[in-house]
Structure formats: structure tokens, C-alpha cells
Image (spheres, rainbow, N blue to C red):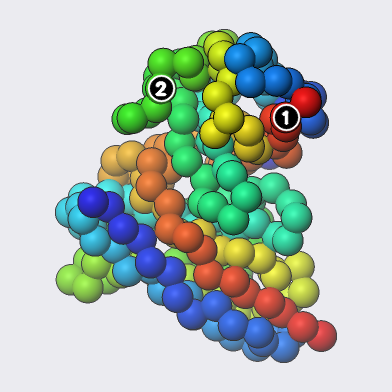
Amino acid sequence: EIVLTQSPATLSLSPGERATLSCRASQSVSSNLAWYQQKPGQAPRLLIYDASNRATGIPARFSGSGSGTDFTLTISSLEPEDFAVYYCQQRYKWPLTFGGGTKVEIK
Amino acid sequence: EVQLLESGGVLVQTGESLRLSCAASGFTFRNYAMTWVRQAPGKGMEWVSGINNRGDSIYYADSVKGRFTISRDNSKNTLYLQMNSLRAEDTALYYCAKNFADLPHQPFDYWGQGTRVTVSS
């Protein structure tokens, strides 16, 4: 099973600041990595697929990069609605797996 | 508008069975793979099972293999998860998710609100 390790576990930032979230895979997943956002009490929302492609309706402040084992989700300037938990997920190999999540909280 | 509405989650005892349903609307159900993902209380996401658009390619997490069965009825636009021999560790919010395309390894572009399963000993 491919293990995804997200860091940091919690990121404390202020609105307007840049957020950089990391996801590291235990083996290469090529570019087959997605990022999801989950707010309290809500279902997850797809943000980025195949490492760097924004999903429909996702603002341009969200961007993804990386390939192989190291991936990054960047939020260029945090809006109040961006404070949430973010998960990475690989689809390169069965079973599909998620990272443990990074919580972006208001500082 | 894509809508996924899960149902069937209840409180059950260890060893009992349960069937979850997910009613889909707003897209051509028979063209897309579907997936179940669960989230234990206060925990992260765990992929459970996926099924292709035709229902003839199915995958399971090791934690549920042999106990859970995913299926779909394309005439009813409904996805199912039959859960047998339930354990305390199956307690979670179960989400139904639509895959990007016809294969179950594709990203999950729409999610339902979830149905809660609680397994008590």
C-alpha cells in the first residue's frame, strides 16, 4: 500500500498569507495525485487532480505541483473560506489511499 | 446539478449486516464509475470500494474485502454497499462519490453528504 504523509499537520496563518502544503508518497505515484478540501460538517471537494490540474470552479489561487513522490498544494493568498482540512490522495495503485490531512487554521 | 444522496446508515450491533444506498441524479449515471469512502469520527479519509460504470470491475480495501459488496443498478441510478459482519472499526460516515470518468481509479469530483454507520458491541 502506498502511504501518503502530509506535512505539516497544522498550519497557522493569517488571511492574505501564502499557504504551502506538502504530500510525500512512500513510492512514486507519477502525477496521479489529487487534493481535496474539507470544511467542518461538509463533504470533501476536489481541488486539484493529476498533480496540477484545477477542478471545475476552483479559484486560481489554488495550485498544485510535483511528481513522483513529492507534491505541493499552494494557496497563494488565503481567503477566509480557505481555512479547512486538506487531503492528498493517490490513484496510481490499488488500494487508493489518502494522506492524513493538513489543517489550515486562522492564526 | 449533480446530487448524491446516501441513505441506510444506522446503529447496529457487532456482526450484523447493513445495506447503504446512494441515489444519483444530475448526470448520466451509467457512464461513470462510483466509489465509497468513509471517515471515522475525528479521523481522515479511507477509500472503501470502487466500481466501474458497467459494474464488472470492482475493487475493495483490504479492511473490508470479503465482508462488503459494492454494486450498482444503472436502471435506478443507484449505488449500493452491502456490509456484512460489521465490526466496531467500521463505525464511520460513509460517503458516496462520483468518479471523473468510467474507471474507479479516477478522481472523485462529486461527493454526497454521507450516511452515518455506528457499530456497537
| Mark 2 Cα-neighbour bin, 10 Å: few <14, some 14–19, many ≥20 | few
Q: CA distance from mark 2 to mark 1?
A: 20 Å
Residue at image location 58% in from the left, 43% down from the top: A38
How far from the left and from the top, in percent, is residue B8?
49, 80
Say which quarter of the image contains residue A55.
top left
Mark 2 or mark 1: name the one nearer the start of the chain.
2
Residue at image location 48% in from the left, 15% down from the top: A61
Residue at image location 70% in from the left, 20% down from the top: A14
Question: Is the C terminus of chain B in the top left, top right, bottom left or bottom right quadrant?
Answer: bottom right
Give the side of residue B103 with respect to residue B19, left or right. left
> On residue A78, which mark appears?
none
Question: Would residue A92 be seen by someone viewing this image from the given angle?
Answer: no
**Can you identify the residue that label 1 sits on?**
A106
Q: Secondary structure at mark 2?
A: loop
Question: Would residue A12 be seen by someone viewing this image from the given angle?
Answer: yes
> On residue A59, which mark appears?
2
